[in-house]
Amino acid sequence: MSWLRLGALRLLALCCALRLSRCSAASFQPILVVGSVNVDIIINVDRLPAAGETIMTRNPAADIAVGGKGANQAVAVARLAAGTGRTSRFVCQFGNDAHAAMMEKALVAEGVDVSASGHVDLPSGNGIVLLEPNGGATSIVLGGSNTAFKQGPAEAWAPLLEGTALVMLQREVPEHVDMAVATAAQAAGIPVLLDVGGEDRPIADELLPLLDYLCPNESELARLSKMPTDTEQQVLAAAAALQRRGARNLLVTLGPRGALLVTADGSVLRQVALHQPGSRVVDATAAGDAFRAAFAVALAEGRPLRDCLRFASAAGGIAVTRRGAVPSLPSRQETERLASSLPCNSGDSSRVVSDGMEPIDGSEVDARTLNGSPGTCAAASGASPRAAAMPADCPYRFASRLNSMQARRDLAGSSGGSNDVLGWVQRQSLVTGLSAVVFNHPQHTAGHSPAQLRQALDAAGLAAGGVALRFPDQFALGAFTNPDPALRHLAAQLAAQGCRWAAELGAPDLVVWPQWDGYDYHFQVDYQAAWRWAVEGYRQLVDACPPGVRVSLEFKPTDESTRWSIVPSAAAALLLAQEVDRPSFGLTLDVGHMLLAGESPAQSVALVGGAGKLFGMHLNDAHVKLGAEDGLAFASVNPRAGLELVRWLQRVNFSGTIFFDTFPRKEDPVREAQHNVQRFKQLWAQAARLVAAGLDGFAATHDAVGVLELLAADEDRPAAAAAGA
């Protein structure tokens, strides 16, 4: 039976892989850009004039080029997606002058589809650009034909959005346009990026939750938040202020200081500015447009967020070295070339910087050991330079199982709180390094209001990391897969309540563990019907959830509730996620569950994370004896598997909360949770140290002994250091 089951699991994985391969081979969905098109009049000046002052230009004549944020980004998408099969579609309003015909012809020549654009009886929009010798560009925009979009219902955009991968918006067109397109895109489950650049006006609170990515530069962020943005901490505070108003992910460009991505769950990804060796800044006019278009292209391709940032930084870094807007936009090949290089710290070859950060463990790394050269550092042993890029400090928030705080009440003391939900939150506040709490619904929410739980979190100095759905016994024959449609409907209602609790608590995710969706005997269920009901149920749930709350499925292959699960493996769970086909539906992987399924946890992380569907991680460990799920401390039984899992979290750029789903019964739960946090951080630093020593390169040749030798040498480091002392 075990061999038959293993074969079935492999078949599921193969089917999933074939499905993804077919998707890749199919025609790629276009990126839709809705926005402005301007004729840019570029005037070279030695400096900007003071108020009331007249100055002469540096050149006798102005330069003329196609511009406007919408047109810039549409062309950038076309160039950056060239050769992939993905197209750039652009909706704008062309004017009635000679400039309009010139710009339309230029856009078509770039491969931009403008067939859905309009023509209006107004002059073309104009961008008057004052260009300083250092490349700084100050612009004044005349709206012209860009102001002539007709108002209409969001539903009117639905036909144009059909089959679209992603939507890009800007603020050089009336806000009713952005509102209608974003509303229609959200209804269709299509991600939306809004470039904040354009008209200097407040942004409507109703618009913010409709956007997947809000993209301001430093000054625009300061304007929108009414907060300073001079330091990174100020930038993060300003971003948080917009998130409290409903914004989700903020992609902030900081000029020469690089960029920050602040995700909906509070994680922060940092990216330094990339530049070609020997280049200098000439004109920053369309650098932000190149950056955001590259990020959108990489995001549509399903790349990890850190790769999206790096690709975007490379595109912006190339654009600033050339004059003009559209003329400065880079090709895919040159952007990939720059993105694949690893920057050193201002040419100092004595220290390697991973995306602008110090090495993880604070130790210096000699660039000579990495075959480095000024401007570019290539990792040793064939390791990919991109694989070495990671945050210097472990970037995650940590949470631990709230029910575990019931254990060893004899050790709790007066500071451990009462033996109830609010008391367990108080006891978790004693765990050093813990920053978030996950509540079960309805077990933990029953009898409480959101205000009460928020008050308990505030008193404990903790945040809501998520809401976990727990179906009661009435769903013993299944929740989303129950044969009774009335009970399936009731399960969907209970799950939707969990989503609303997550929204009220400010938690990013509802995690669904479908413990009853399975069977015990052969011939007990119709597998195809159960699968169909699961797909339909999760679609309905995602569509019913408030904006900003994601739904995550936590598969488990077997349990005392159901000996066989309808979703028995990571591959099957990923297949389900593909069929649910909603951007805000993904997976939570649990180490114990993966071990029960006979899987390598790191391989499952690579599979799910590579598909962009890894929303959550539950860490623990198990002996997997007689099918038992032990819920032991993380990496306590399988330390090398734990190390490899941490490395793959780095590689797929996991950006969620780390949740320790452990079951301390004889142990002090506070000490155990604290140990888990420290252990994860140790493994994070160890993985970074090993990557710098060439760990990833061994995979290229499947060199198992090389890996073992490297791991042994790393484990011998403390002994060698002590002997040297």
Image: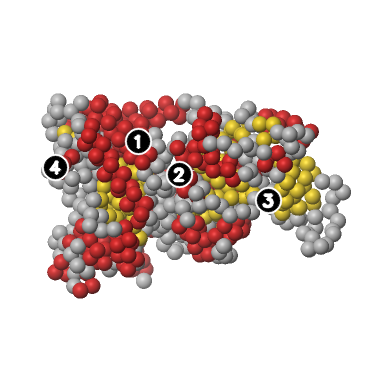
Q: Which residue is mark 2?
A: 304
Q: How is the image coloured?
A: secondary structure
Mark 4 or mark 2, earlier in chain: 2
Q: Amino acid at mark 4?
A: Glu
Give the Cα separation between the discs numbered 1 and 4: 27 Å
Disc 3/disc 4 C-alpha distance (Å): 61 Å
- Which numbered mark, 1 or 4, is in the foreground of this view? 1
Q: What residue type is disc 3 on?
A: Ala
**Label located before the other in sequence (1 or 4):** 1
Q: Earlier in the sequence, mark 1 or mark 3?
A: 3
Q: Secondary structure at mark 2?
A: loop
Toward the viewer: 153 or 288?
153
Secondary structure under the numbered disc 4 in the rendered image:
loop
User: Which residue matches tag 1?
Assistant: 539
Query: Where's residue 73, x and y in %?
Result: 62, 40
Quadrant of the snapshot with the C terminus = bottom left
- Residue under circle 4? 560
At x 37% / y 68%, what residue is drawn? 724
Q: Position of residue 474 (x, y in %)?
A: 16, 41
Q: Position of residue 272 (x, y in %)?
A: 55, 55
